[in-house]
Image (cartoon, helix red, strand yellow):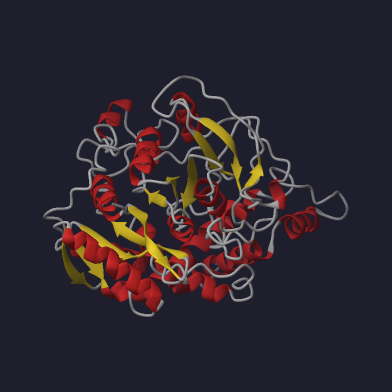
Amino acid sequence: MSLNAFITEAEIDPDADGPLSGQTVAVKDNISTEGVRTTCGSAMLDSYVPPYDATVVERLKDAGATIVGKANMDEFGMGGTTETSAFGAVKNPVNEDHVPGGSSGGSAAAVAAGEADLALGSDTGGSVRNPAAFCGVVGIKPTYGLVSRYGLVAYANSLEQIGPIANTVADAAALLDVISGPDPHDATTRFNASGGGPDDSAAESDADHPATDADYAAAADGDVDGTTIGVITDLLEGADDRVVETFEASLDDLRAQGAETVEVSLDSLEHAVQAYYVIAMSEASSNLARFDGVRYGQSGGYEGNWNDAFARAREEGFGEEVKRRILLGTYALSAGYHDKYYKKAQDARAWVKRDFDEAFEHADVLATPTMPVLPPALGESLDDPLQLYLMDANTVPVNLANLPAISVPAGEADGLPVGLQLIGPKFGEEAIVRAASAAED
């Protein structure tokens, strides 16, 4: 089966024995691997070879894992189908006529097809959970700050987190145990004694990191008796009827195991997709400025002035979706429009966070379908970017609020996978792992 799940196949041996000994891992191609090219799915970085390992890669090697290659992805993480990759689209192993989701589509497809036992993806607006749902595997988007971002090629710094993909909740949680924790290279993983947020103080603050005393794999005990699950009704409206039916059946199963469900509504979610894309594209506009053919990326040549060379490098190196997002982000940040778009988007983000806080006063975890639709056919979505953006309605609110979420298989509809998304409070990974492990039984 040729799924095009890998951009580069290269075996990276472990540095020691550990909890992942004997396990193979696919690493998304926007995560740095020393001596092995890291392209971000872009022609701009076709020949880029990092001089260092990302912190998560170091932790994989220390835990005994064998890395088997760099997984295909939407270019710079911009897309939800893994069709914007400069190295060709990835096929869904469940049905090769359909997309695997994105942007971590290669990672999810590799696990679903048995080409790797585990995988790492990155999730900016659903890019771990989306392909996990579409490929029928498990994907975790951790709380912002739980996992180091050092060595992750940035798309939107304030939103993205590296997360695990696996065939079971227990395996995904075990991988999260390995990669989570404080990192001196990443200030977002440092926490003060009150646990109130990132802290740039001395290394003793590492003891206060939420992952230090956590055991995520042990939380996969399937015990949801007495758990209250809040069903976000706003995210059921407009979803495919087949998806909703499968989602409801999954909730019935959880209720049969002793969970209670309550309905919750978050008014802010009406504006979440718009706010997310303004913020993400604005940050992308800033982050991708470094790819100018001088510092990074292919050269634009030496004819004309620097602006001409800069334009040629980006015209040739970037695909259409990346150019679209850079242009929109630059516009949103430009003089006269910053307050009109970017500031309003940040206000909406704060509203989303408040709504989630209120929802967790009534429920231990929240539930939605991971994706509101079934996996589209290959080639079906590329001509309508707006529809692709709206497909993220159920996943982007989690990133805006910097919360943890997991996608676990809920069943199939018309032979295609449907995912159940469970969302937890800040650093509530153990709660979502426990509920998800009950859902997969």
Viewer-nearest residue: 381 or 242: 242
Residue in front for this viewpoint, 208 or 66: 66
Q: Is residue 206 above or below residue 297?
A: above
Of all residues, the one furthest to the top in this rendering is 16
Total count of labels: 0
Q: Is residue 368 left or right of residue 163?
A: left
Give how far across and how far down residue 18 sits, in percent. Answer: 41, 23
Q: Report the residue at 13% width, 53% height from top.
A: 225
Q: Position of residue 222 (x, y in %)?
A: 22, 47
Residue appearing at x 67%, y 52% in the figure: 42
Q: Residue at x 28, y 32 (%)?
A: 212
Q: Residue furthest right?
A: 303
Res. 336 visible in picture: no
Image: 328 above or below 88 = below
Q: Is residue 259 left or right of residue 69?
A: left
Q: Residue at x 69, y 46 (%)?
A: 45
Looking at the image, which is closer to me, 167 or 368?
167
Q: Is residue 365 above or below residue 261?
A: above
Q: Nearer the viewer, residue 203 or 113?
A: 113
Residue 134 at x, y percent in the picture: 48, 61
Q: Is residue 360 left or right of residue 26?
A: left
Whether residue 177 is visible here, answered yes or no, is: yes
Q: Position of residue 147 (x, y in %)?
A: 39, 40
